[in-house]
Amino acid sequence: MAQGQTSESVAPARLVIHNIGLLLSGDIGNPILDADTVVAVNGKISAVGKAKDLDTASATIRIDAKGTTLAPGLIDSHVHPVAGDWTPRQNQIGWIDSYLHGGVTTMVSAGEVHTPGRPKDVVGLKAMAIFAQRAFSAFRPGGVRIHAGAPVIEHGMVEEDFKDLAAAGVTMLGEVGLGSVKDGATARQMVAWARKYGIQSTIHTGGPSIPGSSLIDKDIVLATDADVIGHINGGHTALPDAQIVALCEKSPRALEIVHNGNEKAALLTLRTARELKRLDRVILGTDSPAGSGVQPLGILRMISMLSSLAGESAEVAICFATGNTARIRNLDCGLIERGRVATFVMIDKAQHSPGQTVLESIQRGDLPGIGMVIIDGMVSAQRSRNTPPATMVPEVVKP
């Protein structure tokens, strides 16, 4: 801020995106909006509609969408961050920035369990969770927002521990079942304590994924009653089909499908949720970094797979990774509506895809090309270095 200026005298940052060919809302109840323009002020959406009906003057950033598609930034509901933009699981630097180039603008930690020497005593696990929450609140590689600080519950924790964690800003638990608590009764009590203090829970589902984890079957999942049935399609080994169907039918909780799981089980979960008329419960994650690596395009690949192989419309499949996750995870992104964070991914069909439109190309199994990523009203990336090249790309023009 220049000398002599006050905060009141600084002009607000005003983003105008016009000439949008298709606007995907992220709202599974109304996934396509009849609009061609979005206006945002100071990183928040202020107007959505037709250009002729909106005030689009005085833009500090103006983007010509060139007829491409605008959608909410993608949310990865299941990641395992550790320190900065580095993962010891694959000894890889820059993985979060690479996910940005896959359209992921928000990540939710399912526990910082890959931390070398992860403490398992109550004092240590609480300290590590608070540290991760603080660190990732202040560190946003490429602008990606990481909701971290997710402690794995261990025997010896009492209600006061959950109260302390909540007071320190911790809002979620790591996967139940990755620590010493593996029985439904103990897990249910701790999940209830967490819920009492506003801390959301996720449970590991399926066979063991890392040393120290165990099989968590449908009886334990149902007994625990965590808020999110984590990787219901296995991370990596899935439960038998009958158990997956039972979880869909008997639990009202979120059904998280992940890239690093069983594809057949993923399709079964989606088809069951559709038969139950509860597609609003479906959310997507990658469950990465993991033994199978880092997947910068993992969320896009899940959208394409569920659309092409499970017969879901592309616009609804995109809601699984945007509005559904935002609502279940209590996030301020993921939907194109007034007051939400102005965080978007702008896509078009990949060059030479046989699909006539971006939605048709996704439903045929192709990945879209990303032309621009916008986070909090600011351009974070332009043409993606990871997706196939988009046919058309947006352009930043002079205000």
Image (cartoon, rainbow, N blue to C red):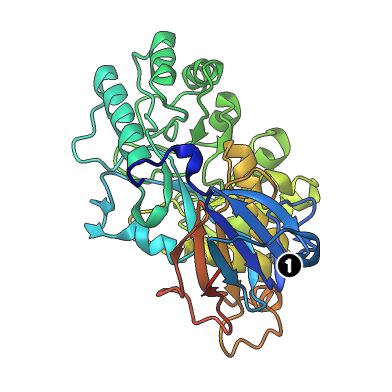
Whole-percent x, y for residue 152 in the image: 37, 29
Q: Which quadrant of the structure image shows residue 367?
A: bottom right
Residue at the farthest front position: 4
With respect to residue 283, does 329 lie above or below? above
Q: Nearer the viewer, residue 191 or 330?
A: 330
- Residue shown at 68%/40% (left/top)? 246
The residue identified by callout 1 is 36
Residue 309 visible here? no
Which quadrant is the N terminus positioned in?
Answer: top left
Residue lying farthest to the left in this orientation: 117
Residue sitting at x 72%, y 58%: 55
Give the mark count.
1
Counting from the top left corner in percent of width and height, residue 109 is at 42, 41
In this rendering, is residue 97 above or below 80? below
Is residue 366 shown left or right of residue 98? right
In percent of the image, x 56 and y 46: which residue is there?
A: 232
Looking at the rendering, in which quadrant would you find the C terminus? bottom right
Query: Measuring 44% from the left and 13% from the top, which residue is drawn there?
Result: 163
Q: Is residue 369 above or below residue 189?
A: below
Reply above or below: 355 against 344: below
Left or right of 117, for residue 161: right
Q: Nearer the viewer, residue 218 or 9?
A: 9
> Is 80 left or right of 326, judged from the image as shown?
left
Q: Is residue 257 visible?
A: yes
Across and down, in percent, residue 307 comes to 67, 67
Q: Nearer the viewer, residue 209 or 327?
A: 327
Label 1: how many Cα within 10 Å (few below 14, some 14–19, many 20+)? many
Label 1: which secondary element: loop
As drawn, is 89 to the left or to the right of 2?
A: left
Please state the horizontal and vertical placement of residue 91, each as a whole percent of the image: 21, 57
Amino acid type shown at disc 1: Asp
